[in-house]
Image: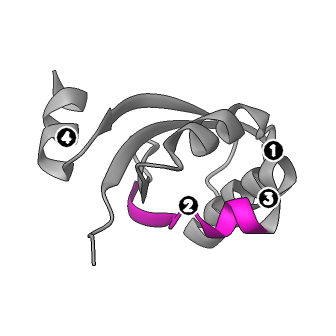
Amino acid sequence: MKRMKRRYLALHLECEGIPTERDLMDTIWMAITRLFGEVGASLTGLALITFNIERKEVVIRTSLASLPMVRASLPTITNISGQQASLHVLAVSGTIKSLINNIEQ
C-alpha cells in the first residue's frame, strides 16, 4: 500500500477577535464542503497542526492531491464565529521544518 503524501500550509489569520481552534477548523471544513461537497471534503485529510494566537498564524495539514481544493476554498472564508475574518496562505511545504524556515525568513 502506498503512503499518502502530505502538504503543510502556513496561514495568516486576519480577524477582529481570536476564534477558538474548533471554530477555525469548522469554518475551513464548511468552506471546502460548500465548494466540493462532503466527498471532496473527506478526501482532504485536513488536520490542524499549530495555532499561534499571538502571531495569528495557523499550520494545517492536507493531502497532496487535495491541496488545490483547500487553497481554492480558503478565500471564500469571510467570517469565523460571526466575526469578519480572512485567511491568507503564507507558504506551502512538504515538511513542517522547512515550512517554519520559510515563514521565518
In-image side of 13 versus 4 (left or right):
right
Amino acid marked by disc 4: Ile
Q: On the image, numbered disc 2 is attached to which residue?
A: 44
> In the rendered structure, which disc, 3 or 1, sits on the residue that comes first in sequence?
3
Residue contact at pointers 1 and 2, CB within 8 angstroms? no
Residue pushed farthest front?
1
The image's mark for residue 79 is 1
- Relative to residue 40, is residue 7 drawn left or right? left
Q: Is residue 99 magenta?
A: no
Whole-Å distance between the Cαs marked 4 and 3? Answer: 28 Å
Q: Which residue is located at x 72 percent, y 38 percent?
A: 85
Distance between the alpha carbons at the discs numbered 3 and 1: 16 Å
Q: Residue at x 66, y 39 (%)?
A: 74
Mark 1, secondary structure of its residue: strand
Residue at 63%, 43% in the rendered image:
69
On whether residue 42 falls in the magenta region, the answer is: yes
Name the amino acid type tagged 2. Thr
**Can you say whether 37 is above or below 73 in the image?**
below
Q: Residues within 10 Å of mark 1 (few under 14, many from 20)?
A: some
Tell me how the rendering is colored. Answer: one colour
- At label 3, which amino acid type do we have? Thr
The N terminus - image quarter: bottom left
Q: Quadrant of residue 101?
A: top left
Q: Nearer the viewer, mark 1 or mark 4?
A: 4
